[in-house]
Amino acid sequence: MRNVISGGVFLDTVVQARHVTLQQSRQGIPALCGLPAPSPTFTGREAALAGLDEVLRPQGVATRFVPVAVVAGLGGVGKTELVVQAAQRAFRSHGWFPGGVLFVDLHGFDRRHRLAPDRALELLLRALGVSDDQMPSGLEERSQLYRSVLTSHAERRGRVLVVLDNAGTSEQVRPLLPSDPDVATLVTSRRTLADLVNARLIELRALDDRDSVGLLRDAVRHARPGDTRVDEELREATNIARFCGHLPLALRIVSALLAEFPQRPLASIAHNLADTQRRLDRLTHGDMHVRAAFDLSYQQLSREHARALRLLAQHPGPDICTESAAILLSAHQEGDSDDSEHRDGRSYDGVERILEDLARSHLIETGSEYGRWRLHDLVRLFAHELAEPDDSGMEGMTALLTHLTGVAYDATTHLRSERAPATRFETLKQALKWLDTEYPNLLALAPVAPTLPHAQLSFALLVALEDYLEHRRLYGDWAEFAKSALGGTGLDSLSAFWAQHTLGHALLHVGRYEEAIAAATRTRVICHERQDWRGASMAEQQLASALSSLGRHDDAIEAHRRALLTRQGLEQDAEAAALHYFAGTLASADRLTEAVEAEKLSLELWRELGEHRRTAKALCALGDMYVEIGQLEESLSCCREGFSLLQELGDRREAAVAQYRLAVAFGRLNRGEEMVDAFAGAAELWHEVGDPPARAVALHSLGVTLRVTGRPVEAVRAHREGLTVGEELGDKRTQSEALMGLGLALADACDEADEADEGNGSEESERENEAVDALMRSAALLGELDDREEAAATLNTAARYLRHLGRAQEADEVSEQAASLLSGCS
């Protein structure tokens, strides 16, 4: 009996009947080491690598599943490099895949080179040793054979890893996914591919500043060992990283440019990249092109999605919510033909779907919360380049800014009144959350407003935001909003007056006094042209404040006199305001007796008018003046009444100021306990209203008061809180003051424990060391601020304490540091 078996693929021994003749094609040699070489310079992806390790490491028998991970992200963000690094580490370092690694680039976004699933399976089967005459022709048959061969190979040689790079769609990937738990798969794609069942999703974003500079440094040093340009020009390196949008592809292009020319300074590249019009032209080298990386994704978009991306790029803010995007896109589509491609974008739901699709393709990113979206900086430039003639931004920007201005006005209604009428925001907290979130976008839109057809739009934005700008004390930005309003065309005289006046107000608060004088002078001219004498008086007051701040007290007093003369015959509240500001200028000129009399007149008028808030402010100002002339009981009485009024009004911010003044009055009267309570109350109120700088001042004053009244342990707590606030603010001056107070309070606490003989030796030593460390850190921060005299004084304080502890040698070294600083001051 003779049987002949042919035309099949034989994975193991086949036996049939008594005599068997196998006519099997020659078995190919498996090629399972096809990974590209990993880059020797790789940084900043520790969390993503750890996530891939979890997928790739061998599983316990009880939890075996088919391991699959998808790494998704924008073109150029480093997906392939991450997967190659993870695969090489798992294969060579950990030995998790003794059966080998298969790698195939699917070219999913390149129409010319895209691999169809059956063609990809052909390449994978050949790598597994399957010859041409064993290759099935159909997709399903190839997929089945591929899975069978992988399972057989894993059984004989151990676990196998498959890397599918640059996948376009889930349909391209599914036939290539193994079915054996001993075969793991890593997929990279510019799309999220969340519909791949049971896959771990890892989305890559751009690097941060530190890792971007680190990648630049490592790549340059690898190409040219000993190259120190990145460290020598660290500021320029950081600028380059930001111009590159922290995108690894862009950073590698820059490192290649630097490696080519070792004498080229980083400043040269930073200067070139600063030009947004040519930035993408500069980010190219050899076969690396940022523009080309984005273009592959852009070419996959529908006409509607491509246009949406271009229009979103015109929005200058850092992010955009779905509602704003719907307004922006819909305004552009009102004149379009009613074809199906455009119809869907006119609704909120339609725009949301478009945004989600763009995010799945990683051409936009999700923001801080769902419903907010942002473009990578380089994608924004890329989309700008593709703008078409009908992409004009006027309609969309006008509609968007009109909408945002209206919502902002509704939100700030809650700041203008504790009992605000119902708007789209039910509470002040909701209103502030919206304002804080949208404020960066409103700030970015301000320079655009004067270019739009709506003449009053930039002024309307200024008016809508004034109360918020005051609440958050954003005076520098306030000046820019006012300038944008003044830059608008067709501004009527009343609007021009108010914009100029608020500009002067903002400039005063940021200390730009010469500019404030110029603004007040222009305001005065406008008011005289309009015969607006109340406005003219306000301009004179503003002028007087700026002159007084420059030390020109006589000129300031004359301006106040003009303001008072201008207001004769006007409303009583105008006269009261003029007297209040006049009193302040007289006090600045040390004419305190006159200042008190003027403030008393102002207070009397405010009381008659029933203006409780203004009455409270006048009382607090009068309290300050009484302190200066030594009438301490009168000061205390005024501050108490002012504080009480502000509490009744629910004005917690001004109540905090009043309570701080009350604490100062208590201090002048040596009433320490009440002083402590008042400082603590002010700190708490400033915490509640969200004013960290003011809270830090109150905490420092509280800590100092507690220490000098013999309560050093409580003082330590206050200074620690103040230090935390300073660190959150990044304010070195605040930190140095808190550290100085902390060091002194810790030292006093040690002395108190010694006197009471209650100290634990190790704890006391730790506290002493912390006291010295706090003082030294305070001195270091003062040195960074170039305040050498104060730094030297703090070092001398530390030296005295070290001598008190019997650590003479350390004390001498610290004293020498102080002397060195002082010699540099002479």
Image (cartoon, rainbow, N blue to C red):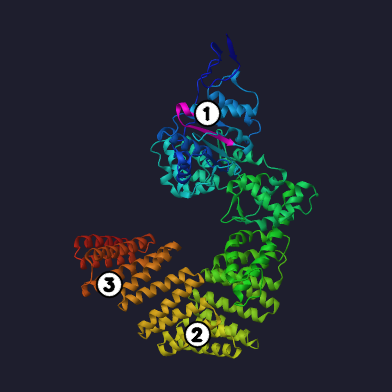
Give the x, y percent position of residue 446: 63, 61
When the figure is inspected, residue 601 is found, relative to residue 689, above or below; the finding is below
Q: Which residue is mark 2?
A: 644
| 206 in magenta | no
Residue at 64 percent across and 28 percent down: it is 139
Check disc 2 and report its element: helix, strand or loop. Answer: helix
> Position of 585 compared to 807: left or right?
right
Q: Are marks 1 and 2 in contact (CB under 8 Å)?
A: no
Cα gap from disc 1 to disc 2, whole angstroms: 81 Å
**Contact (Cβ within 8 Å) of mark 3 with mark 1:** no
Residue pointed to by mark 3? 748
Which is nearer the N-term, disc 2 or disc 3? 2
* Mark 1 or mark 2, earlier in chain: 1
- Residue 676 lies, in percent from the top left, at 38, 79
Residue plotted at (36% across, 85% down):
671
Cα distance, mark 2 to mark 3? Answer: 36 Å
Q: Position of residue 18 (x, y in %)?
A: 53, 12
Which amino acid lies under the numbered mark 1 shown in the image of this protein?
Leu
Which range is magenta? 154-166
Front in this rendered view, residue 407 or 524: 407
Q: Residues within 10 Å of mark 2 (few under 14, many from 20)?
A: some
Q: Type of residue at label 2? A: Ser
Q: Which residue is mark 1?
A: 150
> How many numbered tags mark residues here?
3
Asked which secondary structure carries label 3, the reply is helix
Quadrant housing the C terminus: bottom left
- In the figure, residue 412 lies in which quadrant? bottom right
Look at the image and say whether residue 160 sits in the magenta stretch. Answer: yes
